[in-house]
Image (spheres, rainbow, N blue to C red):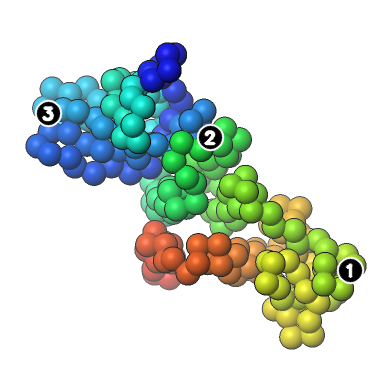
Amino acid sequence: MTENRVFLQPAYILQQRDYRESSLIVEAFTQDFGRLSLLAKGVRKARSKSQGLLQPFIPLRLSYLGKAELKTLTDAELAEPFRPLTGLALYCGFYLNELIEVFLHKDDPHPELFADYCQCLADLRQGGPLEAVLRNFELNLIEKSGYGLQLAYDMQHGKPVELSKKYHLGAELSPVEAAEGIYTGKSLLAIQARNFSDPDVLAEAKALLRHVLDQLLHGKPLNSRKVLNEIIKRL
């Protein structure tokens, strides 16, 4: 690797869009360099060997060059055999991709989160419990993109969260004991421990993390979430 050239970087495509007559601009999530934009020249031509690879959820190794924000893709190859996402898991994958795009700044490395993303896709492919898989990734994303989420301690009252108490989330997105609170201490502690075996905990986790994500995104809507929710309602 030279200063402006990278070889065989593990990556996934988040999304792509047409550029001019035969090219694409792809948004990629890479292991060591974070999120970046790549110009894939001529890949929409009939003879291009890369066009079919530059799709979401395919494990790739990308080579590219350039110092500007938009870098030039020089090669793409399949990193390993994979099973495609299908059905509801496919829409879950698009939700993950949109979260990464709106949360992560370009050229900001997050190798641990990249590993979490790889594991999350593997869980979706294997038919894991979708809601639990999504909640776990949301927690990883919030934590590893620089936002702390502490659910085991009521800082306002200076004491640990108690199983039998009720809480709401304060301005700092941390628990505050309140008789009218919508989150139970039991659920908060289970969410902190990533234990989603209880359906009630899972339901509260969905509501809590939606609230937290909306606050961190300042109300910016997530299009993939709307689509996913509509599909779930029809099932």
| Vertical comparison of 124 with 214: above or below | above
Q: Earlier in the sequence, mark 1 or mark 2?
A: 2
Give the Cα separation between the discs numbered 1 and 3.
63 Å
Q: Residues within 10 Å of mark 1 (few under 14, many from 20)?
A: few
Residue 205 spot, x, y in % from top left:
64, 64
Write the residue at 62% across / 45% down.
144
Going by the picture, which residue comes out furthest to the top? 1
Q: Amino acid at mark 2?
A: Pro
* Residue 45: mark: 3
Assign a secondary structure to mark 3.
loop
- Which residue is the site of mark 1? 158
- Which residue is the site of mark 2? 109
Residue 190 spot, x, y in % from top left:
76, 59
Q: Nearer the viewer, residue 175 or 85?
A: 175
Assign a secondary structure to mark 2.
loop
Specify the quadrant that holds the C terminus: bottom left
Q: Earlier in the sequence, mark 2 or mark 3?
A: 3
Give the Cα separation between the discs numbered 2 and 3.
32 Å
